[in-house]
Amino acid sequence: MFINILKTRFVDTPSLRECIDNVSRETCFLASNEAPSLQDLERSVRACLESDSVHLVALDGNRVVAWAQIVRAEGTSVAHRGDLGMGVLPSYRGYGLGKRILRECISAAHARGIDRVELEVRTDNRRALELYRGSGFAVESIVKMAMKIDGTYHETFRMSLNSAPMHASFPPGEDADDKRHFLNNESPG
Ligand SMILES: CC(C)(COP(=O)(O)OP(=O)(O)OC[C@H]1O[C@@H](n2cnc3c(N)ncnc32)[C@H](O)[C@@H]1OP(=O)(O)O)[C@@H](O)C(=O)NCCC(=O)NCCS
């Protein structure tokens, strides 16, 4: 199959909405179990373009079969950070499309000065975890009670991909013990 990956255009938004709706209802892995309204989706695609974020779709003919977006954080000190969201229609999974659209999205984000890509993924979302780990993302923390679905809580991993070399977690210095103290301190309950 020949799948084209393009920057999202307004003409794609109705099909994009169907794609998001399909993945949201089928998986329970996204923040919502349904797509936003067409109006809200158009607004968020427009906001992406205006903030120099990245929004891509994969097209089979005129049909959106996958999407990936990296939304730049707001504020001058955090504008180098972006938040990733993505999905692939069930019948298009397992053919490398997720990996492909993710790679293009990250590369477009880097070209726009987004040096750090962040995401949150359910700890039982095996397929997505393998995709992210294989693409260089590392787990930074676990978020307890991150999602609540039909009364059941689910944990997520916070993961990131940093294009600039990172300092070691605890560079030698007088505040290292202080950081360790707060990191090891489990909150009560
Ligand atoms: C996660 C998702 C985007 C992956 O898309 P995809 O097109 O199936 O991914 P690919 O075919 O490119 O596979 C990428 C990697 O995922 C892993 N993978 C693929 N199928 C898998 C399976 N059945 N089980 C476990 N890992 C699998 C592999 O590591 C694969 O890399 P490899 O081919 O080099 O081994 C897709 O499953 C999806 O849309 N899921 C629902 C929405 C979702 O969870 N979004 C992310 C929310 S954080």
Image (cartoon, helix red, strand yellow):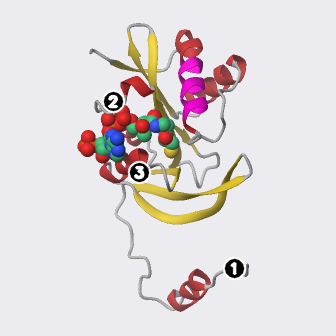
- Residue on which disc 3 sits: 129
By secondary structure, the bulk of the magenta-drawn segment is best described as: helix
Amino acid found under the numbered disc labelled 3: Leu
Crowding at dot 1, Cα within 10 Å, few <14 / some 14-19 / many 20+, comes out as few
* Mark pair 3, 2: CA separation: 15 Å
Please determine whether, in this image, residue 156 is positioned above or below residue 17.
below
Residue 94 in picture, x, y percent from top left? 32, 33
Tell which of 55 and 150 is nearer to you: 150
User: Is 38 covered by the magenta stretch?
Assistant: no
The residue segment tinted magenta is 16-26
Please determine whether, in this image, residue 187 is positioned above or below residue 92.
below
Asked whether disc 3 touches disc 2, contact meaning CB atoms under 8 Å apart, the reply is: no
- Residue on which disc 1 sits: 187
* Mark pair 2, 1: CA separation: 40 Å
Residue 79 in picture, x, y percent from top left? 56, 48
State left or right for residue 182 relative to residue 122. right
Amino acid found under the numbered disc labelled 1: Ser
Q: Quadrant of the C terminus?
A: bottom right
Q: What SS does tag 2 mark?
A: helix
Q: Quadrant of ligand 1?
A: top left
Q: What SS does tag 1 mark?
A: loop
Q: Residue at x 54, y 86 (%)?
A: 180
Tell which of 91 and 43 is nearer to you: 91
Q: Quadrant of the N terminus?
A: top left
User: Which of the two labelled residues, at mark 3 and mark 1, occupies the earlier sequence position?
Assistant: 3
Residue 159 in picture, x, y percent from top left? 47, 57
User: Is residue 159 among the parts visible in the rendering?
Assistant: yes
Q: Which mark is residue 97?
A: 2
User: Which of the two labelled residues, at mark 3 and mark 2, occupies the earlier sequence position?
Assistant: 2
